[in-house]
Amino acid sequence: MNLLLESVRSALASIRAHRLRSFLTSLGIVIGVASVITVISLIQGLSKSVSDQFEGLGGNGLTVRPHNEFKDVMRGKVNYLRFEDVEQLRARVDEIRELSPVFTPGFSEVRFTGLSATAQVFAASSSYQDVNQRYARLGRFVSDSDDAGARRVAVIGEKLIEDLHLPANPVGQFILYANEWFKVIGVMEKRGEIFGMSQDSYMIIPFKTGQSIIGNNTRPQLSITMAVRDLGRIDEARGHIRMVMHQAHRLKGAETDDFELESADQIAKTFDKLSSTVTLVMGGVVGIALLVGGIGIMNIMLVSVKERTREIGICKAIGARSRDILLQFLIEAVTLSLLGGLLGLAIGYGLGAMIAAMIPDFPPAVVPWWAVALSVLFSGTVGVVFGVVPASQAARLDPIEALRYE
């Protein structure tokens, strides 16, 4: 232990004696670790933000929507879900706790006292808030009686209050949509922004009200969002839903599904895969940077061996063993590499936080523990791998020849 501590002390003394050379030697390690930590912190922060958007659903949400290939749409062949599908699923799939049919007329103009805003309008049933676990902050949500009577009422997102200059509590105000006046009965909880786009610029109207607006001659692009009773039976629910949809659409075994079934957290999972791929790519980039840094460390350590040849001869003459010399130079290389890794870690974290703060509405940077551990581990490994050759060369020196070296 005393030998190890003395070797570390000697290594630090040597690094302090040549500060600039030591810094330039480890610069490749610093740049490599700093770049990968910066990118990982930004990607992980974004990934965490996306995951948080779907956390409320708890992974128990399923959505059925029409499946349309781009080439088929270009040919005029478009698949639709039917209103009858809603009743079929409600009556025949026991695993479903609640479901809500939703269709989106699209981004439409909403007006209030001469001001206009573009908002996404959803036509949904009263179960929408329970299925999606999004609730009204002010007022109330659409009720069954609103839906049954096709009333002209609406629940709006927070962004519409700002865009239309509505009062802070707009419940009771009337806004114009599709040339009809809708009474605001509630304001939904704020969801914030994602990828720089607001998630609160929308309006929800009763499902049957939406049907009456588009008329009987227009088929909406209907989707059905469902919440299952038991997460442990979600795969069973998927199979049952597919069977019911096949029967309802009279699809045979060989026919391609004209619908698709998605999990509520599918986007988050897809983004996690994407972030993992980018992280692996950055791992390759930092591997190259560490390789360059390691070569720099080996080069300087070889020069150091030459510079300290006489010192090595004196150490061997007074009883130092070859393994003691090997350990001293190896620890010096590892210390140099680790200090570069730690400096790169600090710089990378600072750069990630600064870049995230500079981009409007970008989520805070997050540095996971495994990125810190891998950075330190890789830096130490580089020091060992590229420090072995100079350390071995120093250990093999003949003491007599070393003492004669000028």
Image (cartoon, rainbow, N blue to C red):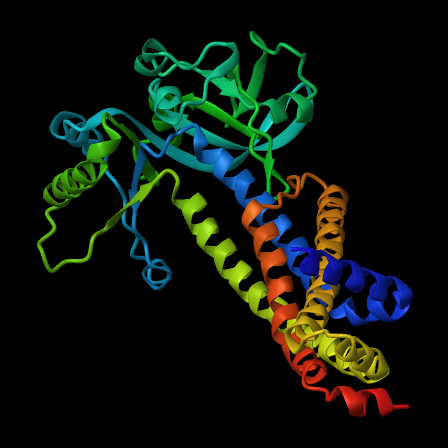
Q: Residue at x 85, y 62 (%)?
A: 13
Image height of 153 relative to 74, above or below: above
Q: Left or right? Give the position of 109 relative to 253.
A: right
The quadrant of the rendering that contains the C terminus is bottom right
Q: Looking at the image, which residue sits at the far front?
A: 318
Quarter of the image for residue 20 reads: bottom right
Question: Would you say 238 lies left or right of 108 here?
Answer: left
Quarter residue 146 falls in: top left
The answer to whether residue 269 is visible is yes
Report x, y in % for residue 255: 14, 58
Residue 175 lies, in percent from the top left, at: 57, 18
Q: Is residue 220 left or right of residue 275?
A: left
Above or below for 143 versus 343: above
Q: Give how far across and how far down residue 390 sits, in percent.
A: 70, 80
Instruction: Determine whether 302 is above or below 361 in the image.
Output: below
Residue 185 seen in the figure: no
Identify the residue shown where x is 45% and y is 22%.
134
Residue at 41% across, 23% down? 133
Number of numbered discs: 0
